[in-house]
Amino acid sequence: NAISFSQKLKTTLTYSINKSNIIETDKIEFKLNLSCSQYLRRKTIDSIAFADLMSSGTLTCQSQFRIPSFNQDFLSIINTICQSYRLTG
């Protein structure tokens, strides 16, 4: 119900294999961590709407990520940010 914090999904797959009238059963456990950015929807806004959003005081969360810019081109920096926050374009 809440997407303000990461979610954890855990499930178990149980399977049986019949080999020469001998049934072998085994289980595989899956754990999946879903970060908040997994729930984000893509929305395009213009620069005025973005400035209004930043100055409105309604944003409740902030994130900071420092990337050393020396010896990196702009595309590499953008790719690092997208990978860190699981963003896609």
Image: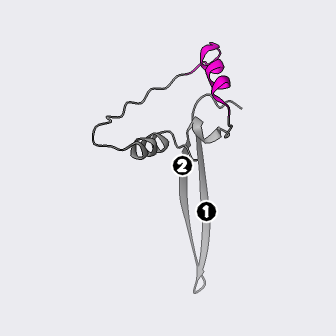
Residue that mark 1 sits on: 14
In magenta stretch: residue 69:
no
3D distance between C-alphas at marks 1 and 2 = 15 Å
- Residue nearest the viewer, comparing 62 with 7: 62
- Residue nearest the viewer, comparing 89 with 24: 89
Residue 45 x, y percent position in the rendering = 68, 32
Residue at 71% in and 32% down: 1
The numbered disc on residue 31 is: 2
- Residue nearest the viewer, comparing 18 with 88: 88
Is residue 7 among the parts visible in the rendering?
A: no
Identify the magenta region.
Answer: 45-61
In the figure, residue 43 lies in which quadrant?
Answer: top right
Please rate how many residues cluster around mark 2, counting C-alpha atoms within 10 Å: few if below 14, some from 14 to 19, many from 20: few
Residue at 55% in and 47% down: 32
Residue 33 x, y percent position in the rendering = 54, 43
Residue at 66% in and 23% down: 48
Please rate how many residues cluster around mark 1, counting C-alpha atoms within 10 Å: few if below 14, some from 14 to 19, many from 20: few
Residue at 61% in and 84% down: 21
Q: Amino acid at mark 2?
A: Lys
**Vertical arrangement, residue 23 with respect to residue 65, above or below:** below
Q: Amino acid at mark 1?
A: Thr
**Vertical arrangement, residue 34 with respect to residue 52, above or below:** below
In magenta stretch: residue 58:
yes
